[in-house]
Amino acid sequence: MSLRLSGASLQHGNGVHALRGVDLSIDAGERVAIIGPSGAGKSSLLGLLASALMPSAGAVEVLGQQPWQLSARARQRLRTRIGLVHQAPPLPPRQRVVTAVLAGKLGQWGLGRSLLNLLHPSDIPGAREVLARLDLTDKLFAQCQQLSGGQLQRVGIARALYQDPELLLADEPVSAMDPVLADHCLNVLCRHAEARGVTLVASLHAVDLALAHFPRIVGVREGHIVFDRPAAEVDQALLDALYANEQLVSPQMPAVTLSLQIPRC
Ligand SMILES: Nc1ncnc2c1ncn2[C@@H]1O[C@H](COP(=O)(O)OP(=O)(O)OP(=O)(O)O)[C@@H](O)[C@H]1O
């Protein structure tokens, strides 16, 4: 078992209950998409799986360990085995793309090599190879602040691929990309996960991409898992119920009153 949540709840600092009693098991090597409306709790769920957020109730097991039973140091070691892909990668604006990609291995390198890498990128061919998979080699020496949102997302993916983790967690990894690029990048992530037996969990707003790339779909709404099905079994009725929004009222067509002027003869 790669990941397990048992009755996991999460209450944020402001008192908001983002997740309520979630049960979820994901085997090693599975590829799972998390879908659901805005504010449903998808990022919070990924935060629990990443051992970044502590559950307010229930248990979390990640890569065979219970992160919140570990010492801070051991938990940090566990995190180095997890690759995170952010919707907006938190990269220093002036950092070069090559350095940002190679930083994926900082958790695995010693302090000396890490510091040296900041001054002289130690594995330029390695960074070029992962960027080539995402059609971004021309930006190898560009500064992160010179990139578009979609290009930055590709740097974030390249960094996670270079890290070569046992578990990949991606929060809206292709939201800033055009449809063709988004499809390509998800394909790269999924092929990487498949080839290496890596567990991949991604949250996605684009339901078509989720269904096309992921064998298992988890629907989240108001902090609960409302369905957990093979992609082939996710139908329109399930999606309509998942995304139903009672707060948004469709604009009513104005009633047309016809006044006929019939000439008198
Ligand atoms: N750091 C935080 N502090 C306080 N409340 C938060 C925090 N992060 C999220 N929330 C709240 O928790 C709930 C779930 O948020 P979350 O970001 O997990 O949803 P989401 O499904 O990822 O949404 P989206 O699709 O819009 O990114 C929301 O009500 C949100 O306002």
Image (cartoon, grey):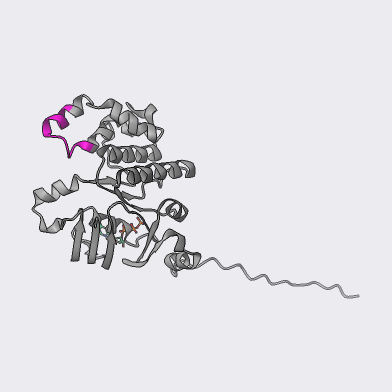
Residue under the point 47% across and 43% down: 178
Is residue 96 in view from this perspective? no
Where residue 245 sits in the image (x, y, percent)? Answer: 44, 67
The answer to whether residue 101 is left or right of residue 79 is: right
Task: State the residue lying farthest toward the bottom.
Answer: 264
Is residue 104 in view from this perspective? yes
Does 73 sit above or below residue 264?
above
Where residue 176 sits in the image (x, y, percent)? Answer: 41, 44
- Quarter of the rendering containing residue 64: bottom left
Where residue 98 sits in the image (x, y, percent)? Answer: 29, 29
- Quarter of the rendering containing residue 196: top left
Where residue 96 sits in the image (x, y, percent)? Answer: 28, 29
Residue under the point 45% across and 69% down: 241
Task: State the residue lying farthest toward the top.
Answer: 120
Residue 66 inside the magenta-drawn segment = no
- How many badges with numbers are in the image? 0
The answer to whether residue 130 is left or right of residue 61 is: right
Does 220 sit above or below residue 143?
below
Task: State the residue lying farthest toward the right.
Answer: 265
Residue 115 inside the magenta-drawn segment = yes
Residue under the point 43% across and 59% down: 231
Point out the image quarter for the N terminus: bottom left
- Is 31 in front, or is 173? 31
Q: Which residues are magenta?
A: 105-116
Point out the image quarter for the C terminus: bottom right
Q: Quadrant of ligand 1?
A: bottom left
